[in-house]
Image (tube, helix red, strand yellow):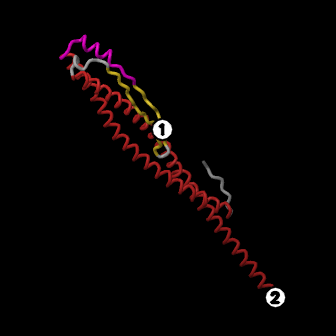
Amino acid sequence: MKIQINATRMEFLKLRRRLSTAVRGHKLLKDKNEGLMREFLSLIKIYKEARQKADEGLPNCMKMFVLARITSSSGIISTALEQSKGELEIKVSEKSILNVKAPVFDVSIMENNSYSLVDTPVDLDDAIMQLKEFFTHMVKVAELEQSIRLLAREIEKTRRRVNALEYVLIPQLQESIKFIKTKLDEMERSNISRLMKIKEMLVAKTIV
């Protein structure tokens, strides 16, 4: 974008104000981007931990089901699973991360285990509990993945604005201000030279 330049004092002052605003905006956006990066890296760390728990959860859960199957008959296990009902409810809300709206998934599992605890092995209870934890971890992983995507998008958008100010607009304004100042200085020297000549002419006429 080429800035139209009028070599006047008014234009000079106008461009200086624009430069001051651009410099302040650049600093604010750079600070924002640094803050977003800190939040992004923090979320990445939390995400890795949540992902690891989720990845480990399902195999552990299946292991417990296998142990339950070994220590009890398939009929008892099947009946217990049919009687072990529950409802998974996810409430979605939002939170603000440096003005970026990120999702919050609140999980609640309503259990209705009506199977006999006497006839079923402890491993089955452990398996059902671990399955519930696995669902909770997976929902947390989904929440973090979405938050990370939104932050990454905002970081990229902010970085483009920072670069546009730093490498395009601010240098253009500085160059334009320098150009106008040079022209104004030339005009001032020219005016002074003209005034000196007029003064010399007036003095010469007075002497004559």
Whether pointer 1 and pointer 2 mark residues with C-beta atoms closer than 8 Å, the reply is no
> Would you identify the image quadrant in which residue 21 lies?
bottom right
> On residue 179, which mark appears?
none
Residue 13 part of the magenta segment: no
Please name whichever residue, 91 or 122, is drawn nearer the observer in this view of the structure: 122
On-image quarter of the C terminus: bottom right
Query: Which mark lies nearer to you, 1 or 2?
Result: 1
Query: Which mark is first along the chain, 2 or 1?
Result: 1
Work out whether residue 189 or residue 15 is closer to the camera in this orientation and state it.
Answer: 15
Judging by the rendered image, the residue that carries numbered circle 2 is 208
Q: Is residue 63 visible?
A: no
Number of disc labels: 2
> Disc 1 marks which residue?
94
Q: Nearer the viewer, residue 194 or 63?
A: 63
Residue 65 visible from this viewpoint: yes
Q: Amino acid at mark 1?
A: Glu
Callout 2, which amino acid?
Val
> Residue 2, how many percent across, how many down?
61, 50
Q: Residues within 10 Å of mark 2 (few under 14, many from 20)?
A: few
Residue at 46% x, 38% y: name it: 102
184 shown above or below 28: below
Residue 83: in magenta span: yes
Residue 185 at x, y = what percent? Answer: 64, 68
User: Residue 134 location, x and y as percent?
Assistant: 32, 28
* Residue range of the region highlighted in magenta in the rendering: 71-87
